[in-house]
Image (cartoon, rainbow, N blue to C red):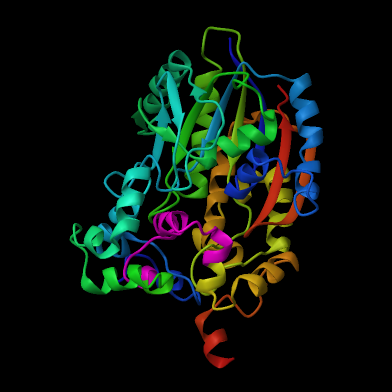
Amino acid sequence: MARITASVYTSHVPLIGVAIDQGKTEEPYWRPIFSGYEHSKEWMANNPPDVVFLVYNDHATAFSLELIPTFALGTGEKYTIADEGWGPRPVPDVVGHPELAAHIAQSVIQSDFDLTLVNQMDVDHGLSVPLSLMFGQPKTWPCPVIPLAVNVLQYPVPSGQRCYQLGQAIKKAIESYDEPLNVQIWGTGGMSHQLQGQRAGLINSQFDHDFLERLIVSPDELAAMPHIEYIREAGSEGIELVMWLIARGAMSDATGGPKPTVKHRFYHVPASNTAVGHLILENNE
Amino acid sequence: MKLLPEEFYNIPGTTIFDADQSRKGYWLNQFCMSLVSADNRAEFKTDERKYLDQWPMSDEQKMAVLERDLNRCIALGGNIYFLAKIGATDGRSFQQMAGQMTGMGEQDYRDMMLAGGRSPDGNRFKHEWEDA
């Protein structure tokens, strides 16, 4: 049977992608950020997944205001890299895993989560920057990716609680898949940042450190944190952090099992407008 | 009646993109969305007014776009992720756009970010800005 072996959490700042694509990672501004991911790449080389289930948000790329799905699961064979206005990133297209995705859809929807299914969409920096941070610059991505796009753009957005429960349902779905696949689940976005209006530039490192700690130690309590707290304390775009709870809900302890093992923890301010946070948790069964 | 609890509308310098804002800004944001195509970016740059006139936007919205007044665009229903595509068309980064929206200018804004960003202290509630 398939297993979820680890969860990975990372910010997905677009300018990080630009820095990678333009070979700026050794510049003094970027060096401290990329050094925080060196250990992650080593860990990844030693723990290569067969499939990555990648939770992210679409930033007005695949979904305009015509259609606003709360949870959109990618069941397609392939996803092309989007032109977000600056031209597409020069990174490989993303190959999906339609068979596992279809199984997850079946199981999760029958667990009362009414997902939207997407076969055709372009993917933006929300998905591609985490891949670059964890896998570097390969000619093709080393494994298939199943995208889950979460609406955190237009309110109402899903609650932390709902996200945490969805993670639990995704775990159950993956673990009931016949093939013996090693699956990682990634939660991306955040940490504190605000891109809009006169309050742009908000960073709350105290909030971020608390969030990381609570995500590790007491995710069930963290899941109860109301939206207003994210927005007021971590900035209007800090709401992206609810997506980390989906990945966290897929660790064994969310459903009565043992705690995961912290393999890596990193935090840095700033990358462009944003606080960068990163965690790797290995699942224990 | 507001869609979300009142506290969501009580954060200074922050607009919650709810369904009311989304409805108000629908065509403004859809216009922005069209700029993800290189052909459309070129057409817009050739004659901005003509390009904007193809969209059922209000005159106020069109003026705000022509003047690149992002705060005004947000007040008129624009969402930052859509508006960023105007910035991309102009070759401007998120940080340059933020420098403008905050009124700080690019360099001061960049310096603030390097120094750890804007503290939440004094920036949580509207009255904290009004009293200041």
Residue at x 50% of width, y 42% of height = A163
Residue B37 visible in the snapshot: no
In the rendered structure, which segment of residues is drawn in magenta?
A: B73-97
Work out whether residue A118 can be spotted.
yes
User: Which x, y percent locates residue A224?
Assistant: 55, 52
Please identify the quadrant where the C terminus of chain B is shown. Answer: bottom right
* Residue at the (55%, 58%) spot, across then down: B93
- Residue A280, given in percent of the width and then of the height, sits at 73, 35
Q: Is residue B27 magenta?
A: no
Q: Hey, which residue is sitting farthest front in the picture?
A: B46
Prevalent SS, magenta region: helix
In the rendered structure, the answer to whether residue A41 lies left or right of residue A120 reads right
Q: Residue B74 magenta-drawn?
A: yes
Pick the residue in front: A110 or B86: B86
- The residue at the point 29 percent across, 55 percent down is B31
Question: In this view of the protein, which residue sits in the foreground, B10 or A194?
Answer: A194
Q: Foreground: A15 or A27? A: A27
Q: How many marks?
A: 0
Q: Is residue A125 placed above or below A2 in the rendered structure? A: below
Kindly indicate the quadrant of the structure image that contains residue B109. Answer: bottom right
| Residue A139 placement, left or right of B47 | right
Instruction: Classify A213 as above or below B102.
Output: above
Point 35% across, 34% down: residue: A114
Q: Position of residue A1 (x, y in %)?
A: 58, 9
Quadrant containing the N terminus of chain B is bottom left
